[in-house]
Image (cartoon, rainbow, N blue to C red):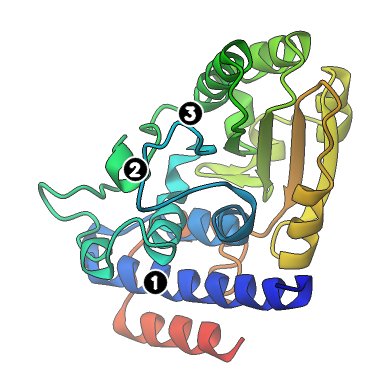
């Protein structure tokens, strides 16, 4: 398939995922859902699952599969939408989201049969887990790659920077981090809570290959992932995004980090997304 056709397919997949995010969030009613963080990373996950990663939904535990770890667990809705769209599970199962006793809780819970590699919850841990997986692959001669999605607020904590140091030391060119750089976190603007300064300079100083992309532009993300070279060092893609992207009343509005939709808001969100 020619690249433009591939980009068209990815844009269509991304749109389906966005619509499902809103539908899932609406169906849980007053329990609410993490909507804006999922809309922020939607295109990143669409490109990974729709094009970049080597995955086989008919054999989700294949040793050759690429690994995807989501550090920012509040992006779960986008992950679930992608797993459903690529055939890891049915739409019927997708709409069990947040049901008691179900497999799709508010934050991902490890379930390899459904394509969920690790549990999320406490922030700042996924990158170090990904490093261990990537190091294991190197030692065993496996060719798969490990992708880890981080929030920019998540980079305030955990073992992020210990991993940044050691992954470079171990020359893990099979480890790719993606930072969903929307400038916000659950409690407000990231720069006001704990300013991380210049992300490009920071990751570069730890010895990482740094690529920047528009995190809502499929072609920009596609080019970023396909620009990764085997340079004997890990890569980080800084994906510039907007929290709540795609729904006008949610964009850069932190009250939608976790919230519930009225019927009027639901209809408005759907109409805006369907018109794009």
Return the x and y of residue 238 as percentages of the image width and height.
Answer: 76, 43
Number of the label disc, if any, that sits on residue 107: 2
Give the residue at x 66% y 60%.
242
Quadrant assignment, res 82:
bottom left
Going by the image, does 188 lie left or right of 256?
Answer: right
CA distance for labels 3 and 1? 25 Å
Number of the label disc, if any, that sits on residue 20: 1
Mark 3, secondary structure of its residue: loop
CA distance for labels 2 and 1? 16 Å
Number of the label disc, if any, that sits on residue 123: 3
In the image, 182 versus 232, the foreground residue is: 232
Quadrant assignment, res 119:
top left
Return the x and y of residue 270 as percentages of the image width and height.
Answer: 44, 84
State which tag comes first along the sequence, 3 or 1. 1
Quadrant assignment, res 33:
bottom left
Disc 3 and disc 1 in contact, CB within 8 angstroms: no
Badge 1 crowding class, 10 Å Cα cut-off, few under 14, some 14 to 19, many 20 or more, is many
Return the x and y of residue 227 as percentages of the image width and height.
Answer: 84, 47
CA distance for labels 2 and 3? 11 Å
> Relative to 22, does residue 64 appear above or below in the rendering?
above
Going by the image, does 185 lie left or right of 113?
Answer: right
Give the residue at x 31% y 67%.
24
Give the residue at x 61% y 67%.
245
Q: What is the quadrant of the C terminus in the image?
A: bottom right
């Amino acid at each position: 398939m020619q690249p433009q056709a591939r980009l068209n397919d990815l844009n269509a997949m991304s749109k389906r995922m966005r619509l499902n995010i809103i539908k899932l969030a609406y169906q849980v009613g007053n329990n609410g859902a993490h909507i804006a963080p999922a809309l922020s990373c939607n295109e990143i996950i669409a490109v990974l699952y729709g094009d970049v990663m080597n995955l086989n939904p008919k054999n989700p535990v294949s040793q050759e599969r690429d690994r995807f770890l989501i550090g920012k667990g509040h992006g779960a809705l986008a992950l679930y939408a992608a797993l459903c769209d690529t055939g890891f599970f049915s739409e019927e199962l997708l709409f069990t989201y947040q049901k008691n006793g179900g497999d799709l809780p508010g934050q991902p819970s490890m379930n390899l049969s459904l394509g969920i590699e690790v549990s999320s919850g406490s922030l700042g841990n996924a990158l170090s887990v990904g490093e261990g997986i990537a190091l294991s692959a190197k030692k065993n001669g496996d060719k798969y790659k490990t992708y880890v999605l981080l929030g920019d607020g998540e980079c305030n904590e955990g073992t992020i920077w210990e991993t940044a140091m050691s992954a470079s030391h171990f020359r893990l060119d099979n480890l790719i981090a993606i930072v969903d750089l929307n400038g916000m976190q659950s409690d407000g603007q990231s720069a006001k809570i704990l300013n991380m300064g210049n992300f490009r300079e920071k990751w570069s100083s730890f010895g990482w290959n740094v690529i920047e992309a528009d995190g809502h532009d499929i072609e920009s993300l596609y080019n970023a992932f396909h620009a990764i070279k085997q340079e004997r060092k890990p890569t980080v893609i800084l994906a510039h995004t907007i929290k709540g992207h795609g729904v006008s009343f949610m964009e850069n509005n932190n009250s939608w980090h976790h919230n519930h939709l009225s019927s009027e808001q639901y209809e408005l969100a759907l109409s805006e997304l369907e018109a794009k």
